[in-house]
Image: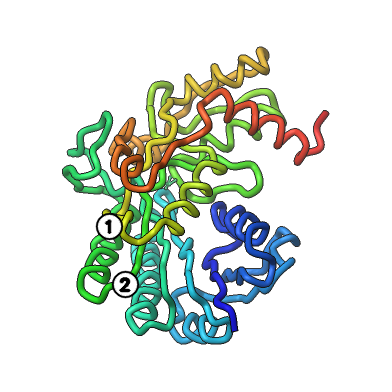
Amino acid sequence: MKKTTLILGACGQIGTELTLTLREKYGNDAVVATDIKEPALAELKNGPFEILDASDAAGLRAVCEKYNVGTVYHLVAMLSATGEKFPMKAWDLNMQSLLHALELAKENIIDKIFWPSSIAVFGPTTPKRNTPQQTIMEPSTVYGISKLAGERWCEYYYNKYGVDVRSIRYPGLISWKSQPGGGTTDYAVEIYYKALEEGKYTSFLSEHRALPMMYMEDAIRATIELTEAPSDQVKVRSSYNLAGISFDPATIGASIQKLMPEFELDFAPDFREEIAASWPESIDDSAAQADWNWTPKYDLDSMTEAMLSNLKTKLQLS
Ligand code: SER
């Protein structure tokens, strides 16, 4: 039986697009989608779909054996803003599900794992601009603590047991097919919906609070390129910095106004402002560029164009 690819968290913001992209590439039956809930998007059932709680070790093992899984894309996590409301739940979910997958790879039940880390691994003491691959990491959110611990476990399983695990520190991800949930960077998705639906938006981050972001198409390409790179090119086994596009709410607002001059933006920062203030403004991703030839395609204005035109069709606005 041919090896298959397993997606954990296939109904989420990244999982949805990764499942669709990998099925297009390898065929519907080659990619097994799983999530704790039924998909809202019927398209996700155009190949195998299983309900699976990724923190259920026995359930995960059974799915890996049933489908002869080779590669696991582990995209299950509670993000930064929700994590602050449910710290223990975030820690349990984020850590247990990763450790179960690492154990399966150690036992050679699966061959390879992709697991995402985040800019949230950095903290208030990290250099804010052009943040290096290796630097001070003192995260102040539960989400960031869980991602940093996860990075350490990934590297540990690689060094100790030869587990082939690969990871990216995603910036905030901006997408139109599926929405994020519970993150601090979510404003940069909401803003496009509100621009089209209401012509105005109130940002929950302040005007000049810059963060690293990336258009989903670039993030999916990075994910697949890293996961499919020859093993000897993958020199970082904790997690790679990925830069993307850095901007603040005022600047994304101005980018929207180039296409929608009547768009109005104001600011009412809430508790997420403090989380954002602890993260970098921009990232140095020279290691990803050097090791597996990473280059992004989208800048802020091309992303704005793509978001507005795709969302217009999706929301059936003319
Ligand atoms: N998008 C994430 C968040 O805001 C950062 O990785 O939590």
Q: In percent of the image, x 48 and y 38: which residue is there?
A: 214
Task: Give the answer, above or below, for where 292 lies relative to 307.
Answer: below
> Assess mark 2: CB under 8 A from ligand 1?
no
Left/right placement of residue 179 relative to residue 60 reads right
Between 290 and 198, which is closer to the camera in this rendering? 290
Occupied quadrant, residue 216: top right
Mark 1 residue type: Ser
Left/right placement of residue 79 relative to residue 67 reads left
Task: Give the answer, above or below, for where 135 lies relative to 188.
Answer: below
Q: Which mark is residue 259?
A: none
Between 137 and 5, which is closer to the camera in this rendering? 5
Left/right placement of residue 154 relative to residue 203 reads left
Q: In percent of the image, x 62 and y 54: which residue is there?
A: 21
Q: In percent of the image, x 59 and y 84: which residue is there?
A: 1
At which x and y percent is residue 84?
37, 53
Q: Quadrant of the C terminus?
A: top right
User: In this rendering, which labeled residue sits more in front, label 2 or label 1?
Assistant: 2
Mark 2 residue type: Val
Between 139 and 75, which is closer to the camera in this rendering? 75
Q: Secondary structure at mark 2?
A: loop
At which x and y percent is residue 75?
48, 61
Disc 2 and disc 1 in contact, CB within 8 angstroms: no
Label whose residue precedes the other's in the sequence (2 or 1): 2
Crowd band around label 1 with a 10 angstrom C-alpha radius: few (<14), some (14–19), many (20+): many
Q: In percent of the image, x 53 and y 31: which residue is there?
A: 298
At which x and y percent is residue 77?
44, 60
Q: Secondary structure at mark 1?
A: loop
Q: Where does label 2 land, which residue?
A: 163
Q: Where does label 1 land, which residue?
A: 238
At which x and y percent is residue 241?
32, 44
The alpha-carbon separation of the residues under discs 2 and 1 comes to 12 Å
